[in-house]
Image (spheres, grey):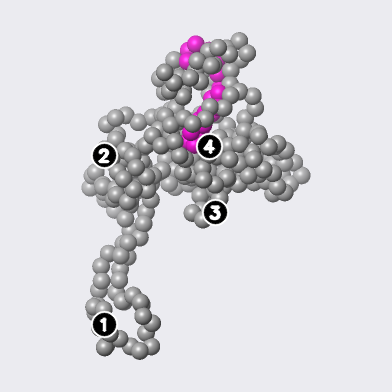
Amino acid sequence: MLRMPRLCSIALPFSNPLYFRLQSLQPSDMTRVLLPGDRVPSTSAASAATTFHLGPGIQSVVVPSSHKGKSKATSDEMDTDEKPGKEAEGVEEDEEVVANRAGLLGLQEDNKSQKYWIEGTSRRYIPQAPEPVIGIIIARHAEGYRVDIGSSQAASLDALAFEGATKRNKPNLKVGTLVYGHLLATPPFSEPEISCVDAATQKAAGFGELTGGFLIRHIELGRCRALLSPKHPILERLGAQFAFEIAVGMNGRVWVKAGDDDTEKLIAMIAELRGDE
């Protein structure tokens, strides 16, 4: 019997408005290939009440749309007090939705919302809130920990970002400890921040320290997204053979744990999850 209590649950009640449920995708959901900078096309006429949700690989950028009023003055007409290079008045700014990574454009839509993301096979992880990640504690400090999540920068983890943690009662994690959390924020010029509690309920919801088991690294990010579905065919088939626990991180890492009697089956499972032939 497959034991996946909350560790790979995807129906977590995040309060982030850009969050949408991660799940395995059908080929019909993949509409087209986009490269970084390509505009995201709308596949249907959207009403004013339509809500757009931007997922991983999609971002909103501000671009100049048009010029109104007088054109730029010539050098003879320019005020002597005006600094060179000053932009002409009347420039309007518009907002566009573009891709920031290469891959297939994923789309889910209904009468009230449209959800877009980029599905790729990259092994390099770019943090995106509120994706779940598996991290490794690499340093400790007075206020918390620095965690390796496989991105260009280590993430910060507050010592109070655990269920039931207080200033007097905080977890004491050692360097090398595995933690399962989700991204809270990904500032462009500073390190990302992760948490081990659900922001809406302040409960662990499956997040926290991972003890025992095996960590599988360097899994394709697209495969990780597919594994987040509880009805993934590999998980269903293996769950019928033996009991195990699994935590899937969108950063290309998967943690699995099983009983001592199922070691050989667990090794075969690890090879299958990695895609080894």
Q: Quadrant of residue 7?
A: top right
In the displayed structure, does residue 183 sit left or right of residue 23? right
User: Residue at 35% across / 31% down in the picture?
Assistant: 25
**Residue 125 seen in the current view:** yes
In the displayed structure, does residue 86 sit left or right of residue 28? right
User: Residue at 48% across / 44% down in the picture?
Assistant: 127
65 lies above or below 42: below
Mark 1 sits on what residue?
A: 73
**Residue 204 seen in the current view:** no
Q: In which quarter of the image is the C terminus?
A: top left
Using a 10 Å C-alpha cutoff, classify the residue at mark 2 as few (fewer than 14 neighbours), some (14 to 19) or many (20 or more).
Answer: few
15 lies above or below 133: below
Q: Do the residues labelled 1 and 3 touch (CB within 8 Å)?
A: no
Could you tell me which secondary element the residue under label 4 belongs to? strand
User: Residue at 30% across / 68% down in the picture?
Assistant: 92
> CA–CA distance between discs 3 and 4?
18 Å
Q: Where is residue 183 in the image (x, y as percent from the top left)?
A: 53, 43
Could you tell me which secondary element the residue under label 1 belongs to? loop
268 lies above or below 100: above
Residue 133 circle label: 4
- Indicate which label's residue lies in the foreground, 1 or 2: 1
Pointer 1 or 2: first along the chain? 2
> CA–CA distance between discs 2 and 3?
32 Å
> CA–CA distance between discs 2 and 4?
27 Å
Q: Are marks 2 and 3 in contact (CB under 8 Å)?
A: no
Could you tell me which secondary element the residue under label 2 belongs to? strand
Highlighted magenta segment, given as a residue range? 238-256
Q: Do the residues labelled 2 and 4 touch (CB within 8 Å)?
A: no
Mark 2 sits on what residue?
A: 32
In the displayed structure, does residue 12 sit left or right of residue 119? right
